[in-house]
């Protein structure tokens, strides 16, 4: 994949999360794609779609700000800042995501979520 195609897929993924579009997010994956976050793992588009549906049902006002994207061949690492609301409580996290691509689609998405350091101010 060309770097601009990888960047486009990552932008599409961020937009799908912000709009709660489970179908759009799942369609970015190969049929047997893998989606991993701390404590959970889903394999296949149907499972990935349901994970986003479940998340969107409980969370609102999702905002994602992409900090940087590093690309090496058909792999990328993304850092983004995430904000959301759940039951009236605002949450934020810094997220590092390792993504592998295959034939223009995501084959593996692995997130490393930091909810602590983004809450601390630097001096």
Image (cartoon, rainbow, N blue to C red):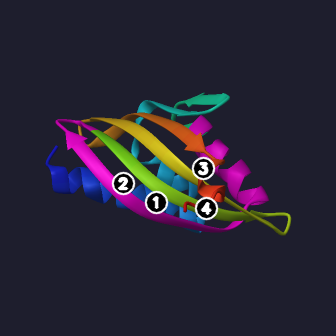
Q: In the rendered image, which residue does mark 2 sit on? A: 10
- Look at the image and tell me in which quarter the N terminus lies: top left
In three-dimensional space, the C-alpha distance between marks 4 and 1, rounded to whole angstroms, equals 26 Å
Q: Which mark is residue 121?
A: 4
Is residue 55 a member of the stretch shown in magenta? yes
Closer to the camera, 109 or 82? 82
Q: Nearer the viewer, mark 2 or mark 3?
A: 3
**Residue 41 point in image, percent of width and height:** 60, 28
- Residue 24 seen anywhere in this rendered image of the structure: no
Mark sitting earlier along the chain (4/2): 2
Start and end of the magenta stretch? 47-75
In the image, which is nearer the foreground, mark 4 or mark 3? Answer: 4
The image's mark for residue 14 is 1
Choose the circle earlier in sequence order: 4 or 1: 1
Residue 79 picture location, percent across and down: 41, 50
Q: Secondary structure at mark 4?
A: loop
Horizontal and vertical percent for residue 43? 54, 28
**Disc nearer the start of the sequence (2/3):** 2
């Amino acid at each position: 994949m060309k770097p601009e195609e990888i960047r486009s897929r990552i932008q599409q993924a961020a937009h799908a999360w912000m709009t709660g579009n489970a179908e759009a997010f799942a369609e970015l994956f190969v049929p047997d794609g893998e989606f991993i976050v701390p404590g959970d793992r889903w394999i296949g588009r149907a499972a990935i779609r349901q994970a986003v549906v479940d998340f969107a049902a409980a969370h609102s006002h999702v905002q994602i700000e992409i900090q940087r994207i590093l690309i090496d061949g058909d792999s990328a690492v993304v850092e983004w800042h995430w904000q959301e609301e759940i039951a009236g409580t605002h949450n934020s996290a810094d997220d590092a995501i390792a993504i592998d691509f295959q034939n223009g689609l995501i084959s593996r998405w692995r997130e490393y979520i930091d909810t602590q350091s983004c809450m601390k101010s630097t001096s």
